[in-house]
Amino acid sequence: MSKQETLTDPATPAISSPPSPPESWRDYSALPCNVLLDIFSRVPHADILRGAGLVCAPWRRLAVAEPALWRHIDLSAAEDKTLSSRDGPAHWQAMSRAAVDRSAGQCESFRGRADSDFLAYLADRSPDLRSIHVTSWIYVTERGFVDGVIKKLPLLERLVMWRGFFPGSSEVMRAFLDHCPRLDLLDLGGCYNSYAVGYRTRERCQRTIRNLRLPKTDPNGCSCCVEYAQDYADKHDYNY
């Protein structure tokens, strides 16, 4: 028998791959709550709010009614570094408030876009809040921030603001010292400030707050006005 006949001999058994096993069907809506919670804890909060929490009734219940999932809220995004709070993604305020509501008062940290109104909302509903990291440009008013935020967060340990305007006056800094005794990191170095901090208050802040970066002086301000404001703040800085 020739070599070619051997290769084409019909008596030679054909070699075939084994059939692949059929795919098993899984009901992911029936996963135990602790397994679902572990899965959701690995999903960005923004994705949960946009749709992952709407897949089925059990997923919806977990996304809405499990405060532990929202204890450390992170809604930061890459575009936060280039956009102002007014120019951010549509509905970011509604998403941030929904996340805070779902924490049911158990939120301990927040990272993401913010404006003055949202910070007041966050402080009102998060008595256990320990950390705030604002990732967008922000404009803060003196009285609103003291009464609406600082005085409501006695457990605050960290506050970071990257860009914007922050009223770093002596009154605001004294409010931090009086109402946030655990404050360990206060980073406002990316913000501008048109106020002056009295030297007594500044010295106490430096002694009390281990990691401290105060706002920069407004570059558009008149140098004579800045000098006058500092002199006035120093002379009227009575409390410390």
Image (cartoon, rainbow, N blue to C red):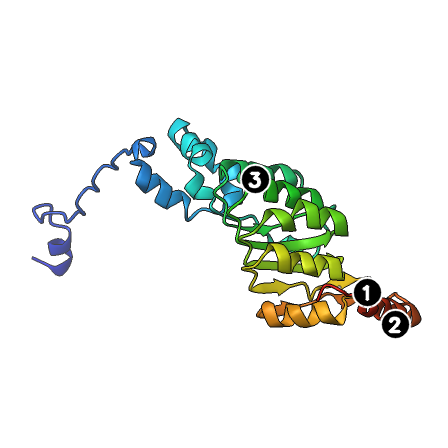
Q: What's the distance in space between the residues labelled 1 and 3, CA to CA?
A: 35 Å
Mark 1 residue element: loop
Circles 2 and 3, Cβ within 8 Å, touching? The answer is: no
Name above or below for residue 170 compared with residue 96.
below
User: Horizontal and vertical percent for residue 206?
Assistant: 64, 71
Q: Nearer the viewer, residue 142 or 193?
A: 142
- Which comes sooner in the sequence, label 1 or label 2? 2
- Which comes sooner in the sequence, label 1 or label 3? 3
Residue 40 horizontal side relative to residue 99, left or right: left
User: Horizontal and vertical percent for residue 238?
Assistant: 76, 65
Q: Which amino acid does label 2 sit on?
A: Glu
Which numbered mark, 1 or 3, is in the foreground of this view?
1
What is the number of the mark on residue 11?
none
Which residue position holds label 1? 236
Mark 2 residue element: helix
User: Horizontal and vertical percent for residue 44?
Assistant: 49, 47
What residue is at 41 percent from the left and 34 percent from the top? 62
Give residue 216's quadrant in the image: bottom right
Q: In which quarter of the image is the C terminus?
A: bottom right
What residue is at 56 percent from the left and 36 percent from the top? 98
Q: Which of 61 and 83 is in front in this view?
A: 61
Which residue position holds label 2? 227
Name above or below for residue 198 compared with residue 4.
below
Q: Which amino acid does label 3 sit on?
A: Arg
Total numbered badges shown on the rendered structure: 3
Circles 1 and 2, Cβ within 8 Å, touching? The answer is: no
Residue 69 visible to an observer of this rendering? yes
Residue at the extreme top of the image, as rendered: 57
Disc 2 crowd rating (10 Å Cα; few below 14, some 14-19, many 20+) is few
Q: Which of 104 and 16 is in front in this view?
A: 104
Which residue position holds label 3? 125
What residue is at 47 percent from the left and 31 percent from the top? 54
